[in-house]
Image (cartoon, rainbow, N blue to C red):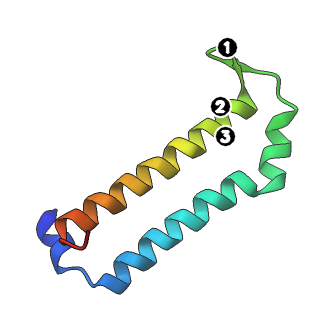
Amino acid sequence: MKGFVRRANRRSIKLIFSIMFVLLYLVVLLPPVYIGISHIHVFIGGLPLTVVYMIGDALLVTLVIWALWWVEKIRQEL
């Protein structure tokens, strides 16, 4: 895996991570999805589904940021 990351083109890595960030932010900002689940009154771990939805997206964004840091660390771009 590290060899693949080292050989990858910087432009392609930036494109992949940019697409991931845009998709994650579109998921959280896309009104039909959020409005669609806001009418569902299901509780997961004591939290409403809409809150779990936002927390889940925030965790995914954090995971992508960590992955980008890991890739830049391998490529010695920090």
Q: Position of residue 61 (x, y in %)?
A: 51, 52
Instruction: Find disc 2 in the rendering and name its residue.
Output: 52
- Please indicate whether residue 50 sits to the left or right of residue 63 in the image: right
Q: Quadrant of residue 3?
A: bottom left
Q: Are marks 2 and 3 in contact (CB under 8 Å)?
A: yes
Q: Position of residue 65 (x, y in %)?
A: 42, 56
Q: Quadrant of residue 49?
A: top right
Question: Which residue is at 50% across, 72% downward?
Answer: 18
Q: Position of residue 55 (x, y in %)?
A: 61, 36
Per the rendering, the mark at residue 54 is 3
Instruction: Find disc 1 in the rendering and name its residue.
Output: 46
Question: Which residue is at 64% across, 59% downward?
Answer: 25
* Circle 3: residue type: Met
Which quadrant holds the N terminus?
A: bottom left
Q: Is residue 75 above or below residue 40?
A: below
C-alpha span from label 1 to label 3: 15 Å
Per the rendering, the mark at residue 65 is none
Q: Is residue 72 above or below residue 13?
A: above
* Circle 1: residue type: Gly
Question: Which residue is at 23% across, 80% downward?
Answer: 8
Q: Determine crowd level at label 2: few under 14, some 14-19, many 20+ residues with C-alpha closer than 10 A.
A: some
Question: Which residue is at 26% across, 64% downward?
Answer: 71
46 or 70: which is nearer to us? Answer: 70
- Please indicate whether residue 12 sits to the left or right of residue 27 in the image: left
SS at mark 2 in the image: helix
Who comes first in sequence, dot 1 or dot 3? Answer: 1
* Circle 2: residue type: Val
Who comes first in sequence, dot 1 or dot 2? Answer: 1
SS at mark 1 in the image: loop
Q: Is residue 29 above or below residue 60?
A: below
